Image (tube, helix red, strand yellow):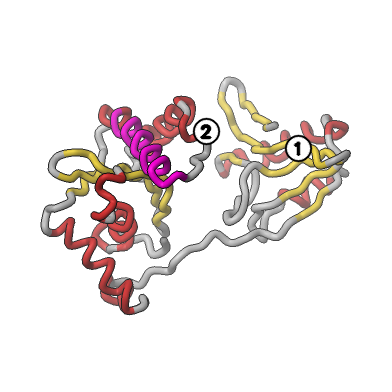
Amino acid sequence: MGVLVHDGPRVAGVAPLTLQRFGPVRMLGMLGKEPGAIGTWVAAPADRAAVSAAVTEELVRRRGEWDAEILSCLVPDSATSDVLAGAGLRIMHRSAVACPAIALPSTWDAYLAMLPRGRRGNLPRHLRRLDEGEVELREVRDPGELPRAQARRQELRQLQWDERGRSLNPMHRTDRFRAFLLEEVRALVPPARALVWEFRVAGQTTGIYVNFVDSRSFYRYLGGFDPAHAALGIGKIAIAAGITPEHREGPRTL
């Protein structure tokens, strides 16, 4: 269950919710799970007050469809629970679980000094594969190349999880998810809010990773690599590349 708020033909906000039954109790909850936190419904800053009011009005109208609402993943200063409770809705609040993050120092050497001895040598060894040309890192910026890159990312991610015998989220195997992620990167790559990294070995694409960035942070998101090249540590190279100053261009949190 979700609530879309429209301003004319434009979608102004989204309230991502789920409706589940636990025995006789119908529980309305937030879409998502810890770790992670959101402050309110999904909306641009200028639309948040109007979206919050519209979502609250809709939930009050439909309050007979559930017995209680559980709000989780909210940041400590979120006003969402107060607004809903003020409208007379029954709210159970769960404290937020902080999303793990690393505060990065200003230099690569200072970061390495923070690590245990084994990892201190491990990351530079993987990055040398980039320096020596064994692995090539290429940023996909051309919008015309994004469909190919996203199709390859999905293919590699499925190969990686299948090789390990692990259960990949079924949604991540669908064309619908690929289309959503493609639309997302098409919107965020031009303003440099998303980075699509393509890793190549001997001219062949062996890994694709999608990351997000803002003025403060580098957010590792989603990717996959060819398990035939697992010994090269493509995933570890992707992590290390996001930490090095030349790739993060200012953000100080990972």
Identified by mark 2, the residue type is Met
Which residue sits at x=27%, y=63%? 245
Residues rendered magenta in the picture: 148-165
Taking the magenta stretch, the answer to whether it contains residue 152 is yes
C-alpha gap between disc 1 and disc 2: 19 Å
**Main SS type for the magenta part?**
helix
Which residue sits at x=65%, y=53%? 73
Numbered badge on residue 171: 2
Graded by Cα atoms within 10 Å as few (under 14), some (14 to 19) or many (20 or more), the crowding at tag 2 reads: few
Graded by Cα atoms within 10 Å as few (under 14), some (14 to 19) or many (20 or more), the crowding at tag 1 reads: few
* Quadrant housing the N terminus: top right
At which x and y percent is residue 164?
A: 41, 47
34 over 27 or under it: above or below = below
Q: State the image quarter where residue 148 is shown.
A: top left
7 over 84 or under it: above or below = above
- Element marked by disc 1: strand
Nearer-the-camera pick, 127 or 158: 158
Q: Is residue 233 left or right of residue 21?
A: left
Numbered badge on residue 29: none
Which residue sits at x=39%, y=56%? 218
Identified by mark 1, the residue type is Gln
Which residue sits at x=62%, y=35%? 14
Q: Mark 1 or mark 2, which has the lower sequence index? A: 1
Nearer-the-camera pick, 47 or 81: 81
Kindly identify which residue carries mark 1. 20
Q: Is residue 222 left or right of residue 8?
A: left
